[in-house]
Amino acid sequence: MRSLCCVSKTPENLSQSIPRRSSESPAIDDIIESATEIIQKWNTESSTFARVTSLFYESKREAMEFIERVKDLQKTMILLVSQDSNSEKLVRAQNLMQIAMKRLQKEFYQILSMNRAHLDPESVSTRSSLTSTRSSTSDFPDDDDATTAAEDSIIEVEEVSTMAMADLKSIAECMIASGYAKECVSIYKSIRKSIVDEGIYRLGVEKTSLSKMKKSPWEVAELKIKCWVDAVNVSMKTLFNGERILCDHVFESSDSLRESCFSDISRAGALLLFGFPETVAVKGKKNSPPEKIFRLLDMYSAIADNWKEIESIFSFESISMVRTQALNSLIRLGDSIRSLLEDFESGIQKDSSKTVVSGGGVHPLTISTMNYLSLLSDYNTVLADILIGSPPPEKSLLPESYFDAAESDDSPASQLTVRIAWLILVLLCKVDHKAKHYKDLSLQYLFLANNLQHTVSRVRSSNLRHLLGDDWVARHFSKARQFAASYERLAWVPVASSLPEISVAAAMSPEEVQQRFETFSTSFESAYRKQSACIVPDANLRDELKTSIARKLLPVYREFYYRHRNTVVLAGGENRTRNTMSVVRFTPEDIGNCLSDLFFEKGTLGNLSAPPSPSPSSSSPASPSHRRPSRS
């Protein structure tokens, strides 16, 4: 027989609703008899019907009456204890109470078990949103059958879930008030913990040792990380959130039981979930793949974005270790991310490859670095938080052109701006050093122009622009054009200089004109052969360069060509045709066609090799053969 000391409420509080009469009072007899009738009806030991039938599913009205009779019986027992603790009526009432509690334990278990689908954390956590959705859509009638069917389904799910939660709450309150909290909690914990553990498993979260993680190929680790990030978002919105809502509802009458149940149900799964990042964040192999930092940032973001939910859901003191574990993982991830940033900077500085990019194109280091930084800029908010307290580069080491002076303060965003600006400066310094591998000075400038143009383009097309500012973009864009102008000056201005000014050309003798044509043809052909190997990957910069070169060459040459080509013919004597072809080798159209072919990578315009020269007989004396100089 269960001890009456398990009754949780005091006689003074509960006996107020029952007049103080002797234990022979007819009212007490009526309460006991009324309770006996319904409790015995559902006695699983004496009735086969009661053993195979659910009270709450058979008749909700009778279930509520059962609960009320048990409550009355409990109050009567308290009164009997205060009057005569050895009375036979008290013994009878206690026997009835044990039968009733056994019945309610069975009902509690059945409701929890049979409604797993309707009481799963996702359904519970979305009950309020379903209600809100139904309310809002009901204001706008829709004749669509599919919409109506969906609404009916939502209503049905919500109603079943709501009824099950209400039944569980009624049973829990009755059992707790009757001194059977331990039995009620034991059933609840065993069933709900299995649901949480199963949910964690189905989300793909499993215990992984540090040694196993270190030995795993990066591809395997990356898949686990992506799975974990999804698991955090889902678990905080549905799994743990829904479980907390259900637990708070069922055990609303007891703060201590709410805390005990939720803590025991969720502790193991939550610690497993939030402990995973620590095994990933530990610095393992020296040469970690570059993309590791982005996966760590994803993990950091997952915890940081859900931090309010973590604090709210795991607010109980008995489960504070979950908050501590999540915070420790956040700290460890931040440390690892800062370390990887330092490794990245060191990798740029230590790059010693002597690879010379053909044609002065964009160096692989520039491409990889700017890809890396542009991806990092997508995490600017998270990175700003991570870099708080991390010593930034000395601003005195940064030229003013590397960041907006207006944003130069100690805010997290400004610290991130300085760090990004510093990394780009380190890259450009390395690019400047690599330019010296080119023996030709003009090619050095083209290499610098191409790499700075690529850097600016990546900044302008990513979140880096918001960090560094439009002034940064404008200044570096201008610097890239200065490099391009220096290339043009060294590579093509000598060709333009070989042509005389119009006023000078008008006074030249036929022999001087012929010499000028020969000088220009030789100079242009030499420059074309040399510069045809150069490439400019950026379409805008390529077009600007070709247009600028053409403006310097074509107008002057066109004027000189049409004014003086007949002079060369007359000076040729008997061999005028052959003489004209060897001296005036290009028409203005030839020059334009040659320039239009410049700066493309091989194969981008098909076959750019020079077409075969026509035979001398096919060229008229007054019209030299049109051709392009050979690239070889």
Image (cartoon, rainbow, N blue to C red):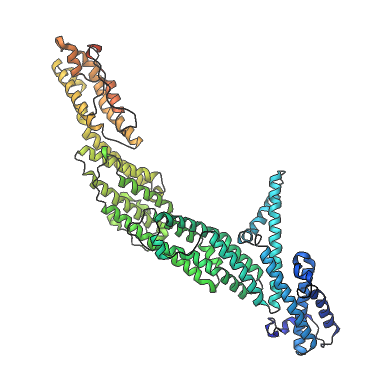
At which x and y percent is residue 346? 29, 56
Q: Is residue 333 visible?
A: no
Q: Residue furthest right?
A: 26
In this view of the protein, which residue sits in the foreground, 202 or 468? 202
At which x and y percent is residue 296? 42, 58
In this view of the protein, which residue sits in the foreground, 313 or 5? 5
Instruction: Look at 68% across and 57% down and name the residue there.
Output: 157
Q: Is residue 113 visible?
A: yes
Left or right placement of residue 252 versus residue 344 in this view: right
In this view of the protein, which residue sits in the foreground, 141 or 466? 141
Left or right placement of residue 23 versus residue 623 in this view: right
Q: Residue furthest front?
A: 48
In this view of the protein, which residue sits in the foreground, 312 or 35? 35
Q: Quadrant of residue 573?
A: top left
On-image quarter of the N terminus: bottom right
The answer to whether 457 is drawn above or below residue 579 in the figure is: below
On-image quarter of the C terminus: top left
Q: Quadrant of residue 364?
A: top left
Q: Quadrant of residue 261?
A: bottom right
Left or right placement of residue 592 versus residue 198 in this view: left
Left or right placement of residue 498 versus residue 296 in this view: left
The answer to whether 70 is drawn above or below residue 314 in the figure is: below
The answer to whether 165 is drawn above or below residue 549 in the figure is: below
Q: Residue furthest top?
A: 574
At which x and y percent is residue 581? 20, 16
Query: What is the count of numbered marks?
Result: 0
At which x and y percent is residue 150? 68, 49
Instruction: Look at 82% across and 82% down and name the residue there.
Output: 28
